[in-house]
Structures are given as structure tokens and as C-alpha cells.
Amino acid sequence: MRRLKLLARQSGIYCFIIPALALYVVFIFYPMIHTLLLSFHEWNGATITKKYVGFANYVKLIYDDIFLISLMHNVIWLMLSLALPVSLGLLLALLLSEKTKGRELLTIIYYLPAMISLVAVGIIWSLIYHPQCGILNGVLRLIGLDFLTRPWLGQTPWVLLALIAAGAWTYFGFCTLLFLAGLQNIDPQLYDAAKVDGAGRLQQFLHITVPLLRNVTTLVVIWTTIGSFKVFDIVWAMTRGGPHHSTEVVTSWLYKQAFEASRVGYGAAISICLLAIILILTLAYLSYAERE
Amino acid sequence: MKNKLSYKSSEKLVAVAKYGFLAFVTLLALAPVVWVWIGAFKSHLQIYLNPFGFPETFNYRNLINAWTIGRFSVYFKNSVIMTLATVVIVVLLSSLAGFAFGMFNFRGNKPIFYFMLIGLLMPPQAFIIGLYYLLKDIGLLNTYWAFILPSAGANVCFGTFMMRAYFKSLPRELLDSAYLDGCSKLQSFIYIMAPLAKPAMIALFIFQTVWNWKDFFLAFMLIHKESLRPITVGLIFFKGRYTSDFGLILSGVTIATFPLIVVYLVMHKRFVKGVIEGALKG
């Protein structure tokens, strides 16, 4: 250990870190600070001078109905993602962790949608939802449920759900993979012991599987949270936030404000808000999960 | 006897339900992709009249049109250049930094490392506006670098994290003996440690390739020149231009999705392992 310290003291060790660190500082960290500073200004992106307005942009956010609606859509996205792809992933992982024929093939297939860029996913699903030639309405007609057919991307409550379903399609495989890896790390002897003690399947699940999966669960929940607040690609590919802001999310609103309406300072305030939400939720969940 | 029989048959029922469910999910996962790929070979009329059917004649014209007139050949080339450049930078710099963080004690090891961890949690939305004006000021907006440098800067945090964990798991005695043999740090890295870290580097390489190939946000925000668009950005504008021509859009999506899926199917073991290792460590 002492030798290693000595070795390091000969300096030069920093040369290994500096390239990576520099890239991160110049192109990520500094721009973030710059965004933070911009959020205290009013600026259209073109003039040389910027007007300092203090927290005015943040105050405006509170009164911006569309921003609040967007935020709510992100929250709905998070809730439904936890409900649908994450639980489906857990269920599939549980099924696959038992003796299953073709387990490897199935995991490969389940993860396959994750290989498709979200833009392509959005386009694929907007074709699936297409009123005339989409397969969703086609299937509904085929099984005689004509009354359920609708222009999925044109009606208010359905369009957001349709987008979230498309998101779930690319995401459940990732959850399955992680939960499966977590389950395979659990010592099978624990289950044998529980069986000897007369524990049923549900008890085994609650008292062995759930606690021992905690690390993976924490990871998946954090990943889902960050992902749900970051959504943009799918929304932009399918609806651009429409119709009438019914699928507006924070990032699409940010883009429209900062780049389309040239309200750079206001857009920056949305950016920083998003960062704060993600950091607070992640750290809060982490400290909750660690404490238990 | 009777009890045993019914126990067996109920077990069978559970198995049937289980495999039925797994098969249903398989269908859900595959059907959209297969539908698109088959649709690429259909004419517009056929898609309208018979969305489920197989193409009556395999019609390559849409694919060729998308590749040439739709300029997917250009977008494809751009994606390859930008992805490859980013991934090479990330793997190289992350390995160097991970080696230093994981194997040496030096002043600032922990603080600098935690500082880089912030980058792991930071969504691109948080820095995109500042980044846009930074790149504009230094004249890099609308170049390949506008994607490569920030993408590498963001991903290098994840890479460093992953490589550090790997180097930590390697025995330190190796480094000691290399040092006794008169190796410098750089030599011990190149000749001893880097070869040992090859599995992690390959996993990182794969991970990064998928991420960067699929990335849309950075390129969409920072590259507005049509001839420099990567495939994801090209696809979204392509869809806007040919909204009514289904066959052409399906062909565009096929070109955008097919390569990565083929690579994935060929190398699935490495992919799955990479995802699990990357995510569980990350």
C-alpha cells in the first residue's frame, strides 16, 4: 500500500485522469453551470447583453399551466412505468428463474425491442396506432371489437397511454434482464430451507426473494425515475406533445421554449428544475432504500 | 392415487398457463418489428388493404428509394462515424481514468471520482442549453464534434465508474511486480493491466455502441445540417416528409433498426452480459 502511495506521489497519475475529466468538465459540467446562470436571465439567444431577472423565471414556472401539466404527464409516465414494464419484468424474471425451456432464447427476444432507437420505436408505434392501416385497430376489428377502435393518437386520455405503452414495450426487457440476474444471485439453498420449514410460495417470495432483490429493485426504480422524467424522443417522434399539449412533457416544453420561442432563460429554468427533481427523487429514494 | 393425479394435472395446467403467457409476451415483443420489416417490402396499396398479409411480391423499390432518395446512405454513414469516434474515445479515456482511480491512492482520488459521478445522474436536458451556446461560440455547432465531444464527455463518467470497479477487482500485486520490473505507470497499464481489463473494455464498447447509435437528443439539438444527421435524426425528418407513404416510412425504419438487431442476435451473449454487468455496477 505504501509503495503504491509512493508510486502515485511520483506524480503523473493525474495524466491518466485529466483527459476524461477535462472532457466532462468542458462539455458537461461547465454547460450545466452556464445553464444555471442563464436561468437567472432574460435572453432571446441573439443579443449580446442579457437582462438579469433573478428568480423571475422560476416564479413564472409556477404559474405556467402547460409546464405543470407537462410535469404531471411525467409523473403519470413514472407511475405507469413502475406499474407496467417494471412489474412485468419482475413477473417474467420470476417465471424464467424457475426451470424453463428456452430461457435463453426468451430473454434474447424480450430484450430485442431495447435495441431499437426510441425514434424508431415512436414511428413503429404511431403506425401501429394508425386509424386505418394500423395493426391495433386491425386486431380489434378482427376479433369483433369494432367499437373499441379509435384514432389512438388523436384522443385525449388515450394518446398519453398509447405513448406510455410504446415506452413500456422497449423497457420491460431491460427490467426482466436485471431482475433475472438478481434472482440468479440468490442462493437456492435458502428456498430449500424455507420449504423444509413449511413456507409457501408466497411466503418464500415475500421473505426471501423481495429482501434479497433489494439492490436490483433500487436500481430499477432509480433508472425508471430518471428515464420517466427524461422522456422526449418517443414523444417527439409520435405527437410532438400534441394534440393540445395532451402529451406535453417537461423536455418537449423545454425545447419549445428555449429553441423554438427563443426564451432561453426560461428554458434554462425548466432545465434546472428537471435536474433538481431528478436529483431530489433519486437521492431521496436512495437514502430510503439504504436505511431499511 | 386420485389426489396425486389431480396434483399432477394442476401442475400441468400451471405449466400451460406459464408457457402460454411467455409465448404471448414473445408475440408482443416480436410482432411490431416483424410487421415493420415485412411491410417494407409491400406497396402502399397492399399495406392499406391488407395490413397483416405477407407481401404478394417482394418489392425492393421502397428500400432502395429510402436508401438513395431518402438519403439513408448519408445518415447511416454519419451514424457510423459519430458512434465509432465517441465509443473509441470513451473506452480509451475511461480505461485510463478507471485504472488510476481503481489502483492508486492519490490526493483527490475520492473527491474527483465523486465529482465525476454527478455526471452519471445528470440528464442531457440539464446542460443542453449551455452546451448549445458553448458550441456556437467555439464554432463547433453543426459539425460531427458537436455530437462526439459532449456524448463522450457524458459517457466517460459511466465508463470511468465501470472501469474503476473492474480495476479494483484485479489483484494489486500485479502492479507491484510490474513496478519492480521497472515498468512506468503507462507501461504497466499498456502491457499488463489493459490486457487484463479486456472483458470490461469489450462490455463497455458494446454498451456505448448501442447507446450512441440510438441517441437522438444531442444530435437533434446540436446538429442542424441535413448532411450531418445521424440515422435517428434523419428518420424523424424523413417521417415528416413522407407521412403519407407508408411503404417508404417502413423501409426507413427497417434500415434504422435492422443492423443493430442483427449484430445483437449474433453477439447476444456479450450484449446480455454487458447490460447486466454495466447496469449492476452502474
Image: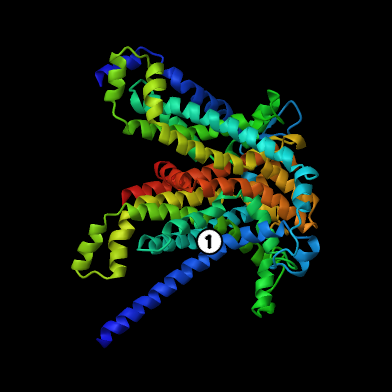
- Rendered position, B133 above or below B229: above
Quick check: A94 left or right of A130? left
Rate crowding at label 1 as few (under 14), some (14 to 19) or many (20 or more) other CA atoms within 10 Å: some
**Residue B88 visible in the picture:** yes
Quick check: A23 left or right of A13? right
The picture quadrant where one finds residue A11 is: top left
In percent of the image, x 35 and y 63: which residue is there? A98
Q: Nearer the viewer, residue B66 or A241?
A: B66
Secondary structure type for disc 1: helix
Q: Nearer the viewer, residue A118 or A230?
A: A118
Q: Which residue lies under the disc numbered 1?
A: A80
In percent of the image, x 22 and y 63: which residue is there? A192
- Rendered position, B21 above or below B268: below
Colour scheme in use? rainbow
Please, what is the three-letter code of the amino acid marked with disc 1? Leu
Looking at the picture, how far across and down is residue A144, in whole percent? Answer: 66, 80
